[in-house]
Image: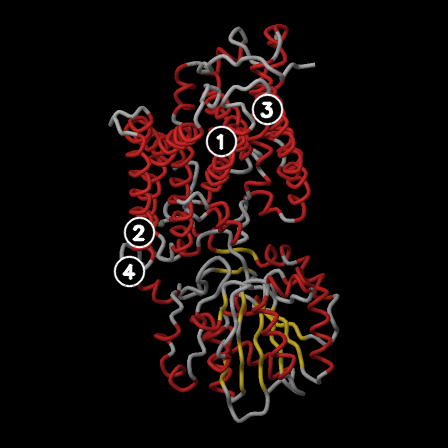
Amino acid sequence: MINIENKKLSQSKYRPEIDGLRAFAVIAVIINHFNKDLLPSGYLGVDIFFVISGFVITSAAEKESKNLFDFLSGFYERRIRRLIPGLIFFVLVSSIVICFFNFNSGVSLQTGIASLLGLSNIFLYSKSLDYFGLSADLNMFTHTWSLGVEEQFYFLFPFLIWFSGFAKQTKHGVRNLFLVMVILSVPSLIGFLYLYQNNQPAAYFLMPLRFWEIGAGCLSFLFYKNQNKKGENSSNFLTIILFLLIIFIFISPNEIARLNTLTTICITSLFLLKIRTKHFLYKILTIDKIRYIGLISYSLYLWHWSILVTSRWTIGITKYSILIQIIIMFLMAILSYEFIEKPFRTNIFNFSRFQTFALGIIISLISIFSLLILGKPLKGKLYLGNYKYINLITRSRNNSNKNIVSEYGDYSGNFCHINKGNSSINNFNFERCSIKNNNNKTFYFLGNSHSDHYRETHYLLAKKNKVSIEGISVSECLFPSAEFKRKKCQSQFVILERVKSLIKKDDVIVISNDGIGDNILELNVFIEFVLSKGAKVILFSISPNFEYPVQNCYENWFSKQNKKNCMIPKSQILKRRAQEIKIINNLKKDVFIYDPLNVLCKNNNCSVTDTSGKPLYIDQNHITDYANKNYIYPDFINFLQRNNFL
């Protein structure tokens, strides 16, 4: 039984092997981000960082302190010096760089702002971003989610340290902190294991569900400082086995991610507890060059992702570019560490505690303001690419459809696409999202952004065929029904209730939404209601999804890449759709299915451009107005005529 009652803790000493372990973790993350097939679970290096953070931060709080204000101010001063200077330098430079190569860099800049506020994990969760998906790979600041988790933990942890008595080194301080960390970590772990299966973004991004990982590091330190003399005889063989197990986990498939995460945390905690100076791995991890990589690991973690994302927007990541990209990563990391991180951390400028806080806040606010300027007044001004294509893929309804706007009003995605399901829809002007004609038939276009990107087709249908249309798209919650869904998805609920109150015989409901199976029960109920009114339902199959920045498929001097990435075999698209087709087949038999693949994919291939080289896609899965006018609209009209809709 380990005694955690009343041992007086000695002052913590620097453990160089921890920097070696940091080096190992950051290299695993970088390899995974270069190519997930090389090290499928290498991203778990971030989880090792969480354990190390818990261990080191508990060690740093070991010094005796008698005053809460001094303890808290000292704690946060160290965090500011450690994290903020390198982060600000990274965010500012990377934000400017991404504006050079990505015309629509808004999401990256928003994530960058959130990272400066310690909230990027919450921002990414609010976007329901899949960390392993393409959109994450193209966001300059996706990886800062882990900093958000740590920074939010740091707001809570010093209070636990202080009020447990650990910081004051009271008689039962160690025991109290141990109990508190166990009590908080156990439900955090249970929540993580449950939600990883049911709500992966929450389990991945949110601090309460990651608390147990940093908590494991804290508990490991408490055991380490209080183990009895027998602990000094820890087995060299055991530490080698533990290290090999981590490597084995890194090369294991991502399909067992929950088990891998739990095992990685346990093994890392045990490794920190058992490694000794006489061990073989200690000597390896404390080699100067390895230890230096650990020292620069924070900057290296920040910059490696920036280099990779910039490469994805430009030259790509190939076997010919890897060496150059690695060199740039290390050069930027060394520059940041030696000239930004290190001087501030060692207080070479001799700032007082108050000056440190003031400077951190002021520079952070200036940086946030700078990113806001890049995202609004300077949007597109720094772009170095070909504006000929930008004009084709930028969907500015009020400019590109002046005749339709003046004739039919403001039927525009700028007004008629709601970004959040719980956005306020009170006093919403539905008329501006309607085009009225004398024809008694009305087409109602429903869905998310995959309905909105057909808005040009809506226009042309109303203008040339004199039917009435209404189209309001919502980015979330296609068919909410339960009371809690009504609260979360108020906009979509109100829209659906409106349509149900207005729909009449011979009207047409057109539904276009990716992830159509997410609300299959509610969808069937809605379809049954529509059919009972004598109306008809058309379901759009989802458009192709290119796992590649489509802007790089258009001619730009900085993206001379292999254009095979700009074309996907139609068979591959159909394979991805297998689950959707299964769901569609279980819908009401009276539903009509329109498939855009029939016109967007020619010669058994789906291409980002047409044969003349003009862009069909705005991004990875949303089509341009050009594609609407020249391909979707003519084909959709033929579909409507064949099925007696017109």
Query: Residue 337: percent from the left, percent from the top?
Result: 33, 28
Residue that badge 4 annotates: 377
Q: Say which label, 2 or 3, has the lower sequence index.
A: 3
Three-letter code for the amino acid on which mark 4 is drawn: Pro
Three-letter code for the amino acid on which mark 3 is drawn: Leu
Residue 158 circle label:
1
Three-letter code for the amino acid on which mark 1 is drawn: Pro
Gap in Å between the C-alphas at discs 3 and 1? 15 Å
Element type at mark 1: helix
Q: Say which label, 1 or 2, has the lower sequence index.
A: 1
Query: Residue 350: percent from the left, percent from the top?
Result: 25, 26
Element type at mark 2: helix
Q: Which of marks 3 and 1 is in front?
A: 1
Gap in Å between the C-alphas at discs 4 and 1? 41 Å
Q: Which of marks 4 and 1 is in front?
A: 1
Between residue 303 and residue 341, name the one nearer to us: 341
Residue that badge 2 annotates: 369
